Image (spheres, helix red, strand yellow):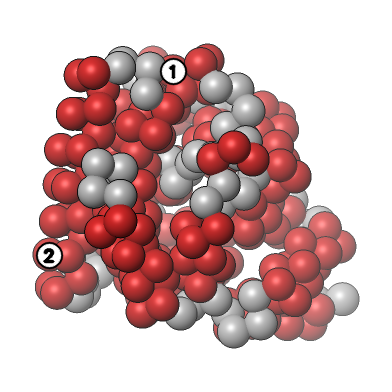
Amino acid sequence: MKQLCLAALVAATRIAYAGADRFVEPSLEHGFNEMYNLAFSEAHRCFQSWEREHPDDPRGPVFDAAAYLFAEFDRLRILQSQFLIDDRSFLRTTPLAADPTIKTAFARALERTKSLSEARLQQNPHDEIALFATVLRYGLQADYDSLIAKQNIRALKGTKEGTRVAEQLLSLYPDCYDAYLASGVENYLLSQKSAPIRWLLNVAGAGTDKERGITRLRITAQKGVYLQPYAKLLLAIAALRDSNTGEAERLLADLATRFPRNRLYRDELAKVKSKR
């Protein structure tokens, strides 16, 4: 049962969208850059301003929800490499100490996302923005359920549904390069478990192909927009799991240069350098 915690990082992959230049919005991109720089108040300001100016666009509230979740990740030190590499930390079942204010704001943002997305999909089932927001909504909630609340079965269900919508999105809009992150992390991380567990996950509909996972992560790292930095961090963690410190150092150095206010990238880079 503990292995279902893997749904956490699978779910994190759903923060996916907008690889094509036609969907790059400078204010939203700025909000993501602030989020990666751990400037969460500025990120919220950008996303909430977008929501006020575009009240029928679910990207505003769902990106705002992402900023709330990343703030909790930072506070609880969830994205540190030792948490993601050491199975003893990763597979713990005791819920973490969630911030109740952030939890409420996060839930409200996801509920607004659901309402706006469903309204658009009723008018057009192929609405790219609504499909993206739906993928992200499932993933963010699954992330919270698994990594913070430790509700692993619920997280796995959300992960599977988010993956289904992500594949639908990519079948319609294959140049949404950030969306490749979804099956990328799913296949890579779940491929790391023992053969019997991989068999059970395949029966449950989860992808467990390591090479497919790495390939898809690299697509987002090379061509993605909003999620490119996140894909690079996950590739760095994958490199550390494979003892490829050179590749990990290259990726982390790029992130540390691009986001100088993010102590996570600096600290992880220092750890890698100390292993030379």
| Residue 28 is at least partly visible in this image | yes
Depicted 177 relative to depicted 98: above or below = above
From the viewer's side, name the closer residue of 171 and 87. 171
What residue is rendered at 81% in x and 79% in y? Answer: 273
- Image quadrant occupied by the C terminus: bottom right
| Residue 200 is at least partly visible in this image | no
Three-letter code for the amino acid on which mark 2 is drawn: Thr
Pinpoint residue 154: horizontal percent, then vertical percent: 20, 39
Three-letter code for the amino acid on which mark 1 is drawn: Gln
Pinpoint residue 175: horizontal percent, then vertical percent: 63, 28
Pinpoint residue 3: horizontal percent, then vertical percent: 37, 42
What residue is rendered at 14% in x and 56% in y? Answer: 108
Q: Is residue 232 left or right of residue 85?
A: right
The residue identified by callout 2 is 104
Q: Is residue 145 left or right of residue 73?
A: left
The residue identified by callout 1 is 168
From the viewer's side, name the closer residue of 13 and 77. 13
Q: Secondary structure at mark 2?
A: helix
Question: Mark 1 packing: few (<14 Cα in 10 Å), some, or many (20+)?
Answer: some
Q: Secondary structure at mark 1?
A: helix
What residue is rendered at 75% in x and 45% in y? Answer: 222
Residue at the far front: name it.
53
Question: Mark 2 packing: few (<14 Cα in 10 Å), some, or many (20+)?
Answer: few
Task: Kindly indicate the quadrant of the structure image that contains residue 257.
Answer: bottom right
Q: Is residue 172 left or right of residue 123?
A: right
Depicted 83 relative to depicted 117: above or below = below
- Image quadrant occupied by the N terminus: top left
Q: Is residue 174 left or right of residue 67?
A: right
Pinpoint residue 13: horizontal percent, then vertical percent: 47, 43
Task: Kindly indicate the quadrant of the structure image that contains residue 94.
Answer: bottom left
